[in-house]
Amino acid sequence: MAQSQGWVRRYFKAFCKGFFVAVPVAVTFLDRVACVARVEGASMQPSLNPGGSQSSDVVLLNHWKVRNFEVQRGDVVSLVSPKNPEQKIIKRVIALEGDIVKTMGHKNRYVKVPRGHIWVEGDHHGHSFDSNSFGPVSLGLLHAHATHILWPPERWQKLESVLPPERSPVQSEEDCLQGSP
Amino acid sequence: MFFSGSPVNTAKIQCIVVKTYGQWWQSLHRTMLRGVLGKTFRLVGYTIQYGCIAHCAFEYVGGVLMCSGPSMEPTIQNSDIVFAENLSRHFYGIQRGDIVVAKSPSDPKSNICKRVIGLEGDKILTSSPAGFFKSHSYVPKGHVWLEGDNLQNSTDSRYYGPVPYGLIRGRIFLKIWPLNDFGFLRNSPNGHRFSDE
């Protein structure tokens, strides 16, 4: 009798010890290093979800790469939606702070991206709720950098950071600093 | 150590050297190295474990912060230490009149500490209240309007516009230091800013 009770107590103690070690480490890993997410919607077609609602892509989100808020033009990133803080949206970075963008459907024709902000757009223009609707977004809303598509297996690939040439900024910050006309 | 001699002698000497070296390495490994390596691994393990617990506590429960700057005087003075909780942010319970800490819209690596004047849909008086022509604007969906209590010396939403809710980190509700000012935080000294009619 005493022996079985001792076994239960030992098991309980080991379980608690493991629980308080494993749960914070797992939560910290998913918040700070990387996690996985399913993509819904058609705003990033054809890069993501080309099959529409039949098969949603699952992407690897890398938090570690954006821990210092460093992104490049062309990166596919996930961010907290500025219009609905409960939702995360996934878009491509088109312009960084200081760039002047030629917008598509925004109330101003040309927008200079303010300091600490970025301009994001979905690849499927016209079907995308992005900076053309809500303007430049603050870098503080940046959540992660989507690096790979993990599922379905036939779409397993690395997401390239390619900026469509027709969407490159009218004048970038580097041009301004070098004083080009 | 070089011995000129026959190949047999050289081979024997090489054997002895290797054996001695092997024994030396084994004893070193048994006594010092394993102890040191073991201790290092344990230390790294504990650091990772407590670091993760600290991250979870700060991210999901709350933490202690030090505020600097004059923009929230007289409610919070420069170098006051306050306690902020993050539960309201996760459950979307931030209300008008709360003092929040948020990421700065123009510099994501620094934080700002302001009071929530308006939530989404509220009408905000953007001109001076003593002015003749009053201009209003509405706080867009998913944003809040932040202002410091020290209106003369505060860079806030009157300068950079409404702030997305997603930038809010936590709600400050208790001042810990200085001890003569310990306690829950006062209401805004600028009551007139809350009118939304």
Image (spheres, coloured by chain):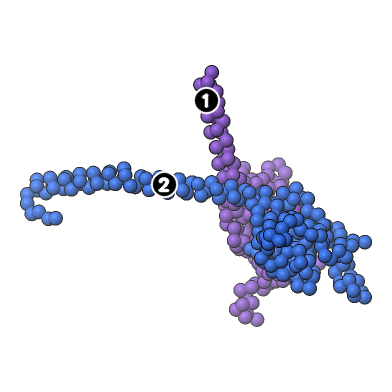
Chain colours: A purple, B blue
Placement of the N terminus of chain A among the 4 image quadrants? top right
Q: Name the residue located 71 percent from the left edge and 66 percent from the top edge.
A: B77
On the rendered structure, is A80 left or right of A148? Answer: right
Q: Residue tagged by mark 1?
A: A7
Q: Nearer the viewer, residue B97 or A44?
A: B97
Placement of the C terminus of chain A among the 4 image quadrants? bottom right
Q: Amino acid at mark 1?
A: Trp
The reply to whether residue B122 is visible in this rendering is yes
The reply to whether residue B137 is visible in this rendering is no
Quadrant in which residue A130 is drawn: bottom right
Q: Nearer the viewer, residue B24 or B9?
A: B24
Measured as percent of width and height from the top left, residue A89 is found at: 71, 53
Q: Circle 1: is it few (<14), some (14-19), or many (20+) Cα within 10 Å?
A: few
Measured as percent of width and height from the top left, residue B152 is found at: 78, 73
Chain letter for mark 1: A
Measured as percent of width and height from the top left, residue A44 is found at: 69, 53
Q: Name the residue located 9 percent from the left edge and 47 percent from the top edge.
A: B9
Chain letter for mark 2: B
Quadrant in which residue A129 is drawn: bottom right
Q: Nearer the viewer, residue A31 or B147?
A: B147
Q: Nearer the viewer, residue B195 or A76?
A: B195
Q: Name the residue located 74 percent from the left edge and 50 percent from the top edge.
A: B88
Q: Which mark is residue A76?
A: none
